[in-house]
Amino acid sequence: MRSYTIKRTLIGRLRQDTDLYDGISRIVLDNSVRIGRISGIGAVRRAAIAYYNQSEGRYEEIELDQPMEILALNGNISMKEGIPFAHLHVILGDRHGQVRGGHLLPGKSPVFACEIFVEEFDGPVLVRKTDSTTGLALWPTATIL
Ligand code: ZN
């Protein structure tokens, strides 16, 4: 277990039609945030998310080709292959209030409007490495609680 304090919080909104994942990733990279947390709300014109098939060890893409509310956007920032990496999950709602959710994919979710917080932490940086048990790029075993 590692201990962190909040170093700073970036608050802003993404420009319309910016990709949701890529826009946040750009903020993380431009501000050199190496360890942190992301949250946000808003709406997208459409979205692509993924479900990790645990038995097959691969992501299955889910396309949502309609305007959706971003009811919750949550994620973390750590290091992967030498650069800051944002891992983001979203819960999206349609016009009937029905929700879909999953792992946010890059490049396929243009923003209608989105307000975000990016919290940068003071403390040891975490580096993602491929975990043979899950097949995922995860934090080191020293962070297992
Ligand atoms: Zn994920």
Image: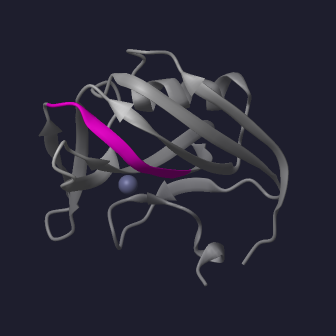
Examine the residues drawn in magenta and state their main secondary structure: strand
Q: Position of residue 84 (x, y in %)?
A: 62, 38
Task: Evaluate whether residue 101 shows in this view.
Answer: yes
**Above-or-below relation of 119 to 30:** below
On screen, residue 49 versus residue 32, left or right, reads left
State which quarter of the image contains the C terminus.
bottom right
Residue 29, given in percent of the width and then of the height, sits at 64, 27
Residue 11, located in which quarter of the rendered image?
Answer: top right
Residue in view at x 56 percent, y 63 percent = 139
Display colour scheme: one colour
Say which residue appears at 73% left-offset and 27% top-offset: 31
- The magenta region covers 66-75
Q: Residue 10 in the image: x percent, y percent?
A: 73, 35
> Residue sitting at 37 percent across and 33 percent down?
43
Q: Is residue 74 magenta?
A: yes
Q: The N terminus is located in which quarter?
A: bottom right
Q: Indicate left or right for 56 with 88 as reference.
A: left
Of the four image quadrants, the one with ligand 1 is bottom left
Instruction: Using the rendered view, name the quadrant where residue 48 is placed.
Output: top left
Q: Residue furthest bottom?
A: 145
Name the residue located 29 percent from the left edge and 53 percent from the top edge: 102
Q: Which residue occupies the foreground of this view, 9 or 82?
A: 9
Q: Is residue 81 visible?
A: no
Residue 105 pos. (x, y %):
32, 38
85 within the magenta span: no
